[in-house]
């Protein structure tokens, strides 16, 4: 019961998966949240168990307020506490602004920004009682610099910066910290589908000359969640290989 508990939204694959795996290896009892990919979530759970960790899987559409609250409350009911919330879940669908429909805009804002609000609100109620906790919000360098075809995604990811900073100011007196991690281009199914020419153009904009690995993001999240970062709050840290220098 003394082991800390982390909830990672959208953690059945990609960056979220790496974050859940890293936190579990650091001793967190981990809640793997997913929307529809139960098989991948279960695979991650078993991998964590093989490493000697403890994990559960919880399905929830956190773009819905009631489901987000249920996710957090079920995690606390299972483990008795929540110490770290990682708002990682996100989706995107590129579209030029003038061609973007209301539903296109709403879906991206709901999943990438509103879901973070719903989950954070639910988690904070538990963290306030024990006067400790950590929130890490996964944004994007697109939220800092913009990107053609991603006005909705950029708006949502930029919104996380102000949202996180406000949490840091409102609840710092309760020893609750809130920070943002802004990844650049990270290896994924999307980047693996790029042509050689597209890859070359992309890498030319990155100072380190390579794509990031999901564990590059996970390592930073784990640091921010740890006592080593106990005096860091209200910050946005980039993991982009120097792309936005």
Image (cartoon, rainbow, N blue to C red):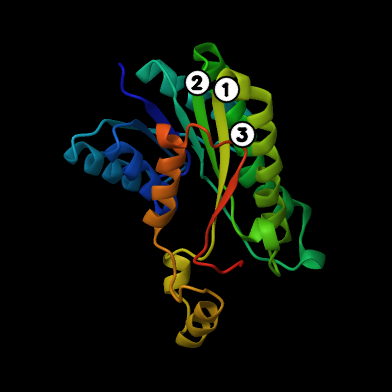
Give the secondary structure at mark 1. Answer: helix
Q: Residue furthest right?
A: 98
Residue 13 in percent (x, y) is at 39, 51
Q: Which mark is residue 132?
A: 2
Q: Earlier in the sequence, mark 3 or mark 2?
A: 3
Give the secondary structure at mark 3. Answer: loop
* Mark 3 to mark 1 CA distance (whole Å): 17 Å
Above or below, comparing residue 138 to residue 99 in the picture: above
Could you say which is closer to the camera, residue 172 or residue 46?
A: 172
* Mark 3 to mark 2 CA distance (whole Å): 26 Å
Q: Earlier in the sequence, mark 2 or mark 1?
A: 1
Q: Residue at x 56, y 69 (%)?
A: 243
Q: Which residue is mark 3?
A: 64
Question: Dots 3 and 2: beta carbons under 8 Å?
Answer: no
Give the secondary structure at mark 2. Answer: loop
Q: Earlier in the sequence, mark 3 or mark 1?
A: 3
Residue 71 in percent (x, y) is at 49, 27
Please identify the quarter of the rendering in which residue 180 is found: top right
Q: Residue at x 72, y 48 (%)?
A: 106
Q: Residue furthest bottom?
A: 197
Could you say which is closer to the camera, residue 106 or residue 141?
A: 141
Observer able to see residue 12: no
Q: Which residue is mark 1?
A: 124
Residue 195 in percent (x, y) is at 47, 83
Q: Nearer the viewer, mark 2 or mark 1?
A: 2
Could you say which is closer to the camera, residue 57 or residue 49?
A: 49
Q: Residues within 10 Å of mark 1 (few under 14, many from 20)?
A: many
Residue 117 in percent (x, y) is at 64, 33
Q: Is residue 91 left or right of residue 96?
A: left
Above or below, comparing residue 199 to residue 99 in the picture: below
């Amino acid at each position: 019961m003394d082991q800390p508990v982390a909830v990672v939204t959208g953690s059945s694959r990609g960056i979220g998966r790496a974050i859940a795996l890293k936190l579990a290896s650091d001793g967190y009892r981990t809640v793997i949240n997913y929307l529809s990919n139960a098989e991948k979530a279960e695979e991650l759970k078993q991998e964590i168990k093989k490493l000697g960790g403890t994990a559960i899987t919880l399905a929830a559409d956190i773009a819905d307020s009631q489901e987000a609250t249920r996710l957090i409350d079920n995690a606390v009911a299972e483990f008795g506490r929540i110490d770290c919330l990682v708002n990682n879940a996100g989706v995107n669908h590129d579209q030029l602004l003038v061609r973007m429909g209301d539903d296109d805009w709403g879906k991206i804002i709901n999943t990438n920004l509103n879901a973070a609000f719903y989950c954070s609100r639910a988690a904070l109620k538990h963290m306030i009682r024990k006067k400790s906790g950590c929130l890490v919000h996964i944004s994007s360098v697109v939220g800092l610099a913009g990107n053609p075809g991603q006005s909705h995604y950029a708006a949502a990811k930029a919104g996380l910066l102000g949202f996180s900073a406000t949490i840091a100011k409102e609840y710092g007196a309760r020893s609750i910290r809130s920070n943002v991690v802004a990844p650049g281009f990270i290896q994924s199914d999307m980047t693996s589908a790029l042509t050689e020419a597209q890859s070359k153009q992309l890498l030319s904009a990155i100072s380190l000359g390579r794509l990031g690995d999901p564990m590059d993001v996970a390592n930073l999240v784990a640091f921010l969640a740890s006592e080593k970062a106990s005096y860091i709050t209200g910050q946005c840290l980039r993991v982009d290989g120097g792309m936005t220098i």
